[in-house]
């Protein structure tokens, strides 16, 4: 007798690519593929979150390469972004009255192009969904619930009962990817025992586009500039790392006590401060999928890798996956190759997996080096940071690396259409 999936597969709608997950990675990939290959190539995105407006109240640093991708696919023009004009890094203890800057970055990666911008996640996700819809990408407000891998197509059932048969299924369904799990791809990594407290802080004085990262013993405390909001004035987003239990305690404090803890870390250099956004606490860990591909399946974004936010690179790495996978698929389809075949997908995996491991190891090392009380390690890291600060060539390389412009950069991240 036929399995339910087998009997429904006969009436399944055939699509070229089905993307499970309409976060940044899923939507950006859908738009890029559609722009590169429509009308003879069909792209569908499924995510229950598509049923309503984007709810993500967080903000993200978008590096220059990722900004080029958004500009090339036509969404950057739709969002307000705050350029990061300079960045200071300090290595301090909570009680330190003065926090001397050990490292400072400023300047552009190219004339007039800052190395990063801050955006608010909600408006960027809304702009991506609107662009995908306007381009004619098929959007389904439903979850991927059942998957059956076959040689010619992946059979998928959505939570609204719809059956689809895709030449390629893309898992863009985030850190706890159900698609990755169903495909039997294990993920390796560990928890840091740390959590990040995330909120928005209003302050009296202008930040002048300056980002700050204070390496405190419990972990990094980042102040990231946002555009001015007429209702609350000057604002910054904070990512405040603490040991997990301390973070849970702090985030639950009454207003006045939370304010006191915040002020000890934020300081008063921007005048009086007030937390104005909802407080969120997010557990931090490192995980990398054992494989980024299988027959008729590719993983992108957090579904493939989650790293520590110490360098604000998680989403930027996901967008590198998107740019590389879009280029691999567009090249293959134009050559008449099957975009879901292992031979084609291997090129994507080779392109992204090593780079991901390198970034995972780098952010893990940085976190271990900085999130501790050891005086010896403090001396080592301060000498290291001081050296980088005094060597303009090394500093320039760091900025280009952080901006995502080093190595084999995919076309979309160079600002070239597919
Ligand atoms: C505190 C913190 C600060 C950060 N700051 C930065 C930063 O400054 N810069 C940066 O680059 N990165 C940053 N990151 C990382 C960044 O937030 C993530 O890497 C990014 O959001 C991942 O995007 P994604 O599209 O891969 O996944 P997600 O944003 O998790 O999207 C996944 C989507 O899949 C959907 N979904 C889930 N299951 C299913 C299913 N079965 N079927 C269909 N859809 C499904 C969900 O509804 C969701 O919409 C930070 C992370 C943290 C924790």
Image (tube, helix red, strand yellow):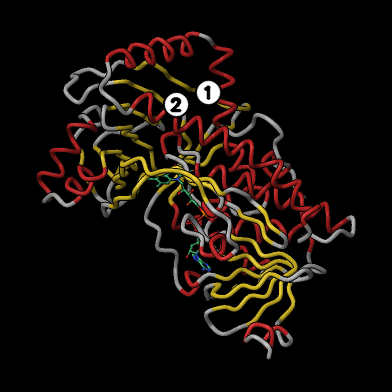
Q: CA distance from mark 2 to mark 1?
A: 7 Å
Secondary structure beneath label 1: loop
Q: Earlier in the sequence, mark 2 or mark 1?
A: 2
Give the vertical position of 154 relative to 367 (above or below).
below
Depth check, front residue: 298 or 259: 298
Residue 370 in percent (x, y) is at 35, 25
Residue 97 in percent (x, y) is at 18, 19
Q: Which mark is residue 107?
A: 1
Q: Which residue is mark 2?
A: 86
Residue 313 in percent (x, y) is at 50, 39
Q: Which mark is residue 20?
A: none
Q: Local crowd at mark 1 within 10 Å, few (<14), some, or many (≥20)?
A: some
- Residue drawn 54% across and 74% down? 145
Classify residue 32 as left or right of residue 380.
Answer: right
Q: Quadrant of residue 355?
A: top right
Q: Local crowd at mark 2 within 10 Å, few (<14), some, or many (≥20)?
A: some
Residue 38 in percent (x, y) is at 78, 65
Classify residue 307 as left or right of residue 322.
Answer: left
Secondary structure beneath label 2: strand
């Amino acid at each position: 007798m036929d399995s339910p999936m087998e009997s429904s597969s006969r009436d399944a709608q055939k699509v070229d690519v089905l993307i499970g997950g309409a976060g940044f990675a899923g939507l950006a990939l859908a738009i890029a593929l559609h722009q590169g290959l429509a009308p003879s190539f069909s792209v569908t995105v499924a995510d229950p979150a598509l049923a309503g407006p984007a709810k993500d109240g967080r903000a993200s640093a978008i590096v220059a390469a990722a900004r080029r991708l958004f500009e090339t696919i036509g969404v950057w023009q739709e969002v307000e972004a705050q350029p990061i004009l300079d960045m200071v890094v300090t290595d301090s203890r909570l009680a330190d009255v003065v926090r001397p800057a050990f490292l400072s970055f400023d300047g552009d990666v190219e004339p007039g192009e800052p190395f990063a911008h801050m955006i608010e996640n909600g408006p960027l996700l809304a702009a991506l969904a609107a662009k995908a819809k306007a381009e004619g990408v098929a959007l389904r407000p439903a979850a991927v619930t059942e998957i059956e891998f076959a040689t010619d197509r992946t059979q998928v059932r959505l939570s609204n009962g719809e059956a689809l048969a895709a030449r390629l299924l893309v898992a863009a369904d985030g850190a706890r990817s159900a698609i990755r799990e169903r495909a039997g791809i294990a993920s390796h990594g560990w928890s840091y025992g740390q959590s990040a407290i995330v909120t928005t802080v209003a302050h009296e004085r202008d930040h002048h586009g300056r980002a700050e990262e204070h390496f405190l013993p419990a972990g990094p405390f980042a102040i990231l500039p946002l555009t001015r909001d007429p209702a609350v004035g000057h604002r910054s987003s904070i990512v405040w790392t603490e040991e997990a239990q301390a973070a849970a305690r702090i985030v639950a404090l009454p207003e006045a006590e939370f304010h006191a803890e915040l002020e000890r870390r934020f300081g008063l250099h921007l005048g009086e401060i007030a937390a104005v956004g909802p407080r969120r606490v997010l557990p931090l860990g490192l995980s990398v999928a054992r494989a980024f591909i299988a027959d008729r399946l590719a993983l992108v974004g957090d579904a493939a890798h989650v790293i520590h936010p110490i360098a604000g690179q998680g989403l930027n790495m996901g967008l590198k996956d998107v740019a590389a996978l879009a280029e691999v698929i567009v090249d293959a389809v134009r050559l008449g190759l099957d975009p879901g075949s292992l031979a084609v997908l291997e090129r994507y995996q080779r392109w992204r997996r090593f780079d991901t491991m390198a970034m995972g190891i780098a952010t893990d090392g940085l976190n271990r080096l900085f999130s501790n009380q050891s005086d010896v390690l403090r001396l080592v890291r301060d000498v290291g940071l001081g050296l980088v600060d005094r060597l303009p060539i090394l500093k320039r390389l760091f900025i280009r690396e952080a901006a995502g412009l080093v190595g084999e950069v995919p076309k979309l991240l160079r600002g070239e259409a597919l």
